[in-house]
Amino acid sequence: MPPGAAPPPGRDGIFSDAAALSEQLPLEPDNAAVAGTIRGGRERGLVVHKLLEEVLTGETAVRAEALESRARALLAQLGVSEAARPEDGPHAPELAATTLRSLAIPEIAALPESVTARADRLFGTG
């Protein structure tokens, strides 16, 4: 750790504001009932993380159809079959909706332009 740097927060510090974060998440009427029944897991987390990364770097469009298609491709790469319903496992429409809701969080909504610009500078993609 660099001199003078604060140590990273412990697990309790990271999740202490989970209730406050949940209140900030935009809810869509269609997804509100499903939210409590979504089956989480490693594969779901990997796909949502990758979708967010690809949107922030400009690789994937911020459109439900594009995100669903990419979610299906990522699930196939992981060797995971898409579930028919989100409560049964990874479900592309739910993964796309989660990505869109995450991108609507005010702190994240402010990121895409700066993250994409930084990626362009670092990797010469612009």
Image (tube, rainbow, N blue to C red):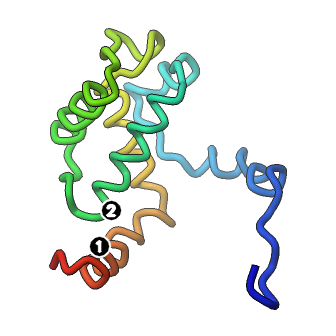
Q: Can you say which quadrant of the picture contains the C terminus?
A: bottom left
Q: Quadrant of residue 98?
A: top left
**Residue at horizontal 77 percent and vertical 67 percent from the top:** 8
**Residue at horizontal 34 percent and vertical 68 percent from the top:** 112
**Residue at horizontal 45 percent and vertical 9 percent from the top:** 88
What percent of the width, then of the height, locates residue 113?
A: 31, 75
Q: Is residue 90 above or below residue 64?
A: above
Mark seen at residue 66: none
Element on which disc 1 rests: helix
Residue, disc 2: 56
User: Which amino acid does the dot numbered 1 rest on?
Assistant: Thr
Contact check, label 1 and label 2, Cβ < 8 Å: yes
What percent of the width, then of the height, locates residue 23?
A: 63, 46
**Residue at horizontal 28 percent and vertical 34 percent from the top:** 74
Q: Quadrant of residue 86?
A: top left
Q: Can you say which quadrant of the picture contains the N terminus?
A: bottom right
The disc, 1 or 2, on the residue closer to the chain's N-terminal end is: 2
